[in-house]
Amino acid sequence: MICDIQTEYADCLFKALTERFAGEYQFHLFQGAEKMREFISLSRAGILVIGEEFETGVYEDLPAEKVFILTEKRGKEKEDGRAFLFRYQSADVIAGDIRAELGKETINPVRSAAKKKSGKNRIRAEPGTEAQVRGLIGVYSPVHRIGKTRFAIRMGQRMARQAPVLYLNLEGYSGGSLYFDSAERQDLGDLIYCLKQERTDYGLKISSMTGQTGGMDYIMPMKNELDLRAVTCEEWMSLLDLITEKCVYETVILDLGDCIDGLYDILRRCDKIYTPYIGDDASLAKLEQYEANLRLSGNEEILRRTVKRPMQRKKAPERGNSPDDEDRAAL
């Protein structure tokens, strides 16, 4: 049973929990306490998920086996037998927290997928590898057609074996349908549109838009290059703030192109930057010019956080290939 005054958020949460607990619990949705109490008085409730806006007296004497309070404060500890659910996180994490409180195994879909694939409890990172990086990771190069996107995806899939990872492609022509299943899936443009609305369910919205490949979550890139160019630097920054604050991802990989507004601002925002390159004269000249431009524009801090990665030219991967199938040398 779900009772929350934030109607749009409650609708999304209702759909998400109904799907994730199918065959276990039947959820009912209420926006008002009176109807909720009337309904629950006629039958015992297994789970009650209720917004913290309601007074304690609304639910303290109800015949519910477990009460979960939706809160906007992260990490709030349990009190009087009631558990707290951080409102702004993905539906998978909310469902996992509920299962944990019910005495069942907590399921992290990202890590469990990696565990099934590897057959091991955990894959430890070797010292100095990308898998230990957390935060925002930018992947950008002034040299094109050298496998930058392939490198970024494979790096993200390897990192996803240890922690939740989200991949975002910010290129004008990403070729996203080659790498991802795009069937009737909302893309990054839809997320930017939602960002312009005053919503309260961003964590669930992002969760509903993501696909997954190799254990790594992704949102489909924009299909129209002009739409990508129209997104302002301020909107990109707001989106990154939103994902950092409201989502469960420990690592966000930004596959960056030249046409986005505020490229240097976004690179400055990144905790680490990978710059793939190849060793021919033309490519090295472009790389040298790029580094000179960073220095002239006062962006030496981008260079200090940059790791250059030599690449080998290989054909693009077929959709659905494992990250270990091709280009091991690139990682």
Image (spheres, helix red, strand yellow):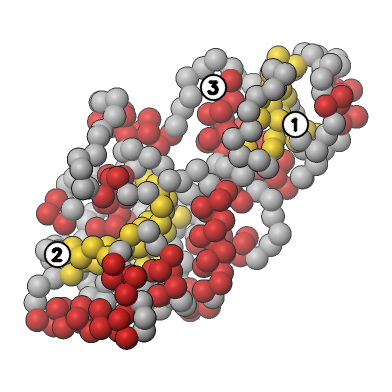
Image quadrant occupied by the N terminus: top right
Residue holding disc 2: 310
Q: Residue at x 72, y 18 (%)?
A: 80
The answer to which of 156 and 57 lies nearer the viewer is 57
Drawn side of residue 234 relative to residue 267, left or right: right
Q: Which mark is residue 50?
A: 1
- Compute the Cα span from label 1 to label 3: 18 Å
Q: Residue at x 30, y 45 (%)?
A: 132
Q: Position of residue 237 (x, y in %)?
A: 52, 66
**Label 2 neighbour load within 10 Å: few <14, some 14-19, many 20+:** some
Residue 145 lies in quadrant: bottom left
Drawn side of residue 210 relative to residue 53, left or right: left
Secondary element type, mark 1 = strand
Closer to the chain start, of discs 2 and 1, is 1
**Label 1 neighbour load within 10 Å: few <14, some 14-19, many 20+:** many
Residue 148 lies in quadrant: bottom left
The answer to whether residue 67 is seen in the rendering is yes
Q: Are marks 2 and 3 in contact (CB under 8 Å)?
A: no
Closer to the chain start, of discs 2 and 3, is 3
Q: Which mark is residue 100?
A: 3
Q: Position of residue 311 (x, y in %)?
A: 14, 64
Disc 1 marks a residue whose amino acid type is Ile
Answer above or below: position of 95 versus 133: above
Disc 3 marks a residue whose amino acid type is Ala
Secondary element type, mark 3 = helix
